[in-house]
């Protein structure tokens, strides 16, 4: 039976993670994500889970990787400064193909920036924060109810693709309280850990990176049940370091392809009134709430405008935007940074004369009126003779 409950965004994140099967949380307090740790500290021991406050964010990231390799679904949460410290471990998790979830409740930056104000400045850091070519999946909800649903999806994707998943929020979304409907357990899909039981309790060494016919993601055996090697170095199927060029190229392309070739399965987005739109507003996270209101107000004035909200930020939904570009004449991108997603969007709409960025980096949420002003001015320019 569905349950109606008043939840804060950070609370929904923690409770959704537990529902997804998270049983290990390691973290370090930082505004505006600390409520996630507080709920985890209270709830995990009740169900046999483990909460540990580490000495810093890098240690927290390393701890959840270790827990995951031992067979437990694991998560950490932080904000911008802590997310910066976690980047080395995120790269390690990519190379070691370890399913973990990193939550980043964004605030203003750079450095310690604006601890209690919202920002969206970590979009590119989520994709390229760790060094080298690497695969990543990044989700970004816009409502408290969606936080609960998508954190479960984040764990599912981590398990399905044996890959770290970044879960972005922002201060507004983390701290807002909304009445949400939690779906009944039977309506929630939970992907459990694919464990290679034939190797558990066996004497032979498990090959955690072995290529098997018609199997793209190798199931993990639990550390402690059998022996296998994990490293951040380029490695062969056994996990032991091998630095030859043919193995390096083959490994990195396989890591990239397991995400790239399944982009259609991973990518999620939401559209509103785009079918007849001449102007497309693109916004995500908390700003998408303002954008939706602005689009509705513009429609009352007979302006043909629609909203495209990327839910999966990475991989970026280029394919769908290219389809929409065939009938879109103008684009407005609204975001709380200096144009990180706008630069990606411009790669699709680069030939469009009408392109506008509505940007704030002062710790204030972009209002519907600011977006509406940009829509109205653009439409006036498009209809001038």
Image (cartoon, helix red, strand yellow):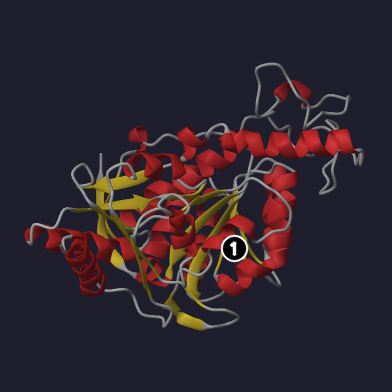
Residue 230 lies, in percent from the top left, at 82, 43
- Say if 161 sits above or below 293 in the image: above
Camera-nearest residue between 362 and 34: 362
> Residue at image x 13%, y 58%?
303
Classify residue 98 as left or right of residue 337.
right
Please say whether residue 354 is visible from this viewpoint. yes
Residue 145 lies, in percent from the top left, at 32, 53
> Residue at image x 77%, y 32%?
208
- Say if 315 sits above or below 363 in the image: above
Q: Which residue is mark 1?
A: 125
Residue 79 lies, in percent from the top left, at 54, 70
Quadrant for the N terminus in the image: top left
Please say whether residue 228 is visible from this viewpoint. no
Classify residue 302 as left or right of residue 216.
left
> Residue at image x 32%, y 69%?
176
State the image quarter where residue 58 is shown: bottom right
Quadrant for the C terminus in the image: bottom left
């Amino acid at each position: 039976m569905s349950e109606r409950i008043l939840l804060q965004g950070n609370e929904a994140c923690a409770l959704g993670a537990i529902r997804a099967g998270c049983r290990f949380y390691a973290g370090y307090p930082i505004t505006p994500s600390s409520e996630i740790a507080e709920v985890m500290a209270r709830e995990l021991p009740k169900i046999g889970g483990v909460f540990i406050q580490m000495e810093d964010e890098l240690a927290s990231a390393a701890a959840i990787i270790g827990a995951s390799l031992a067979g437990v679904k694991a998560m950490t949460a932080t904000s911008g400064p802590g997310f910066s410290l976690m980047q080395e471990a995120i790269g390690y998790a990519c190379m070691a193909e370890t399913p973990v979830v990193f939550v980043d409740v964004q605030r203003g930056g750079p450095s310690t920036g604006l601890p209690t104000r919202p920002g969206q400045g970590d979009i590119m850091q989520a994709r390229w924060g760790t060094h080298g070519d690497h695969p990543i999946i990044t989700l970004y909800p816009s409502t408290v109810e969606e936080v609960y649903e998508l954190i479960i999806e984040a764990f599912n994707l981590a398990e399905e693709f044996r890959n770290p998943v970044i879960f972005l929020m922002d201060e507004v979304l983390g701290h807002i309280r909304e009445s949400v409907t939690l779906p009944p357990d039977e309506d929630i899909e939970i992907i459990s850990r694919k464990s290679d039981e034939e190797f558990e309790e066996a004497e032979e060494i498990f090959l955690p990176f072995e290529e098997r016919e018609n199997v793209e993601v190798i199931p993990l055996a639990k550390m402690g049940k059998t022996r296998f090697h994990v490293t951040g170095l380029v490695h062969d199927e056994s996990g032991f370091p091998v630095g030859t060029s043919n193995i390096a190229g083959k490994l990195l392309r396989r890591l990239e392809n397991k995400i790239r070739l399944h982009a259609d399965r991973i990518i999620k987005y939401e559209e509103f009134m785009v079918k007849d739109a001449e102007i497309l507003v693109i916004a995500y996270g908390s700003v998408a709430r303002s954008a939706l209101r602005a689009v509705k107000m513009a429609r009352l004035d007979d302006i043909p405008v629609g909203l495209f909200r990327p839910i999966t930020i990475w991989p970026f939904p280029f394919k769908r935007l290219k389809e929409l570009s065939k009938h879109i004449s103008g684009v407005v991108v609204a975001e709380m940074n200096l144009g990180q997603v706008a630069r990606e969007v411009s790669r699709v709409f680069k030939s469009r004369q009408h392109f506008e960025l509505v940007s704030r980096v002062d710790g204030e949420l972009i209002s519907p009126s600011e977006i509406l002003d940009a829509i109205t001015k653009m439409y006036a320019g498009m209809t001038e003779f």
